[in-house]
Image (cartoon, rainbow, N blue to C red):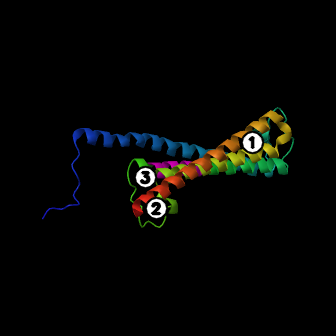
Amino acid sequence: MTDNTSKKRLTPLSGLIFFSRWLQLPLYLGLILAQCVYVFHFWVELTDLIGAAMGNQAALDHILDAVSTGGNRPTKLNETTIMLVVLGLIDVVMISNLLIMVIIGGYETFVSKLGLEGHPDQPEWLSHVNASVLKVKLAMAIIGISSIHLLKTFINAENYIPKVLIAQTVIHMAFLLSALAIAYCDQIVTKTQLAGNEH
């Protein structure tokens, strides 16, 4: 009895083209290294913040240099300075989340299955991920990162010229409109597919 579920044999050309997806593997491995750099940067900043709060002058100088813009350097660790540093840490975490979505979602979608079905730590969003869902999630993550940057700028607004504030706001709105357009297009495609399946 013939097994109808047996794998279809690919032609040499088809096999070569299909195998080319593995060329993306070094890219995802490179993103994992970038993730390691962000983890190291996060701990350096967090260690300096704790050190500055405990009275370490070198850590305080590093923190004040990091949050200073336009030559206006704070003189002490105040609430605004702490808030800017913490927002910077949140920014690192959100970029790290974006990297995870690209690494796991991109590999699962474009390279090979990870075989995480039934795994207790499988990300919920990965069970229904595809190229469209991944684009929407990445767009939303970028908006979140842009929001953090914009918040940091407005908290420290006295150190920025109005032109910079307006430019960052316009860029953020452009990200927001792009994400809405992507989500709307994805909704149209989904409705079209559902209507086609019903017929």
The segment highlighted magenta reads 96-106
Q: Which residue is mark 2?
A: 127
Q: Secondary structure at mark 2?
A: helix
Give how far across and how far down residue 24 sits, in percent.
42, 41
Which image quarter is the C terminus in? bottom left
Q: In percent of the image, x 58 and y 43: which residue is there? A: 37
The earlier-in-sequence mark between 2 and 3 is 3
**Residue 100: x and y, percent?**
53, 51
79 sits to left or right of 146: right
**Which one is earlier in the sequence, the residue at label 1 or at label 2?**
2
In the rendered image, residue 104 lying in the magenta stretch gets the answer yes
Toward the viewer: 125 or 27?
125
- Nearer to us in this view, 158 or 195: 195
Q: Are marks 1 and 2 in contact (CB under 8 Å)?
A: no
Local crowd size for mark 1, using a 10 Å CA cut-off: few (<14), some (14–19), many (≥20): some
Asked if the residue under mark 1 is in contact with the one under mark 3, i.e. CB atoms within 8 Å, the reply is: no
- The answer, for residue 120, to whether it is visible in the render is yes
Rendered position, 119 above or below 85: below
Q: Which residue is mark 3?
A: 108
x and y, in percent, of residue 106 in the image: 46, 48
Q: Residue furthest left?
A: 1
**Label 1, on which residue?**
169
Where is residue 20 drawn, in percent x and y? 34, 40
Quarter of the image where the N terminus is located: bottom left
Say what amino acid the circle numbered 2 marks. Answer: Ser
**What number is the disc on residue 27?**
none
